[in-house]
Amino acid sequence: MSFLDRVRACARFDPGDYRPFVVEGEVVGFVEPDFGALLAAFPSVFEWTGGRLELSSTLTTAHQRTVAVEAALQQLRTRGLLGGWRDEPYPVLSSRSETALLTVERAAVPRFGLVASGVHVNGFVRSERGLKIWVGRRSLTKPTAPGKLDQLVAGGRPAGYTVRETLIKEAAEEASISDALIRSAQAVGTITYATRQPEGLRRDVLYLYDLELPEDFLPVNTDDEIAAFELWPIERVIETVRDSDAFKFNCALVAIDFLMRHGHLDPDDADYVAVADGLRSLPVASARLMQVPPS
């Protein structure tokens, strides 16, 4: 295994396997044909031709679209065809407007292949023995990647939240980080990817932060999403990311980005450029959707 293997695991998207999902004439997502066929059972909401899925033009407002799609998805949920329900609405954004076209239950976002965003925080400590990184182990009850390794703080950005508000909320819930402390986190860029995962097509933009912490800091989880935290020496992080799939797929990318920025990957390595390039594989036009303020 290698760092490049981890990156390639987040670039598994063949457009030929999907059909465009269209809202108000704009392609906002991609669906697998079997999911499109399921939605054909709701002709007042979705128009499915086999070649594309389109939200009905009779739904002319964001509220109408949200209510109609929610009702259809609830029926799929009741029939056991949509798992992992979160009761967490995510915005469906347009490149042509500053308001969301509608909101969609988080569990359905990858089924529609929508662009979503989130924040990840690299919590690190400088000690006499060198750099150390806080690593979280995801709860076994998580609907996605249970038991996998994660950053100190990581979470999706739901409808109605800015990136900064999401950062503050997730830091408090996941690691009991105070408002004053999290405000010292440094924004260090983004990673993007489009990849097929068990839950569907993930097209994500992750906003990254570095947070230097005192040696006596101890994170405490409050939302039952993290089973345990451990403070790892940087060498253990390097070996685990490089040689295993113990980290959740996107958390491995975040860790690689951190290692690269802090000088722990050798520019003379044959894979260095490919790894760097692969950290931002989602087309820029799609990533720009997430720059639109949520409604």
Image: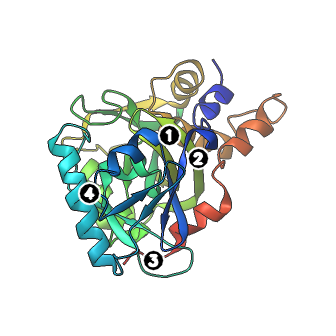
Question: Which dot marks residue 293?
Answer: 3
> Percent x, y for residue 179?
30, 66
Spatial CA distance of label 1 from label 4 is: 21 Å
Do tag 2 and tag 3 residues touch (Cβ < 8 Å)?
no
Q: Which residue lies furthest to the left in this view?
A: 78
Do tag 1 and tag 4 residues touch (Cβ < 8 Å)?
no
Secondary structure at numbered mark 4 = helix
Secondary structure at numbered mark 1 = helix
Q: Which of marks 1 and 4 is in front?
A: 1
Mark 4 residue crowding within 10 angstroms, few (<14) / some (14–19) / many (20+): some
Instruction: Say if 130 sits above or below 63 in the image.
Output: above
Q: Residue 131 lies in what quarter of the image? A: top right
Q: Name the residue under label 1.
A: 250
Q: Which amino acid type is marked by label 2?
A: Tyr
Spatial CA distance of label 2 from label 3 is: 21 Å
Secondary structure at numbered mark 3 = loop
Instruction: Say if 221 sits above or below 52 in the image.
Output: above
Q: Which amino acid type is marked by label 4?
A: Ala
Of the pair 272 and 216, the residue shown nearer to us: 272
Instruction: Say if 110 sits above or below 103 in the image.
Output: above
Spatial CA distance of label 4 from label 3 is: 22 Å
Spatial CA distance of label 2 from label 1 is: 9 Å
Is residue 254 something one can see in this rendering? yes
Of the pair 241 and 56, the residue shown nearer to us: 56
Residue lying at 24% horizontally and 28% vertically, measured from the top left: 140
Q: Mark 4 points at which residue?
A: 172
Q: Name the residue under label 2.
A: 193
> Percent x, y for residue 23?
46, 68
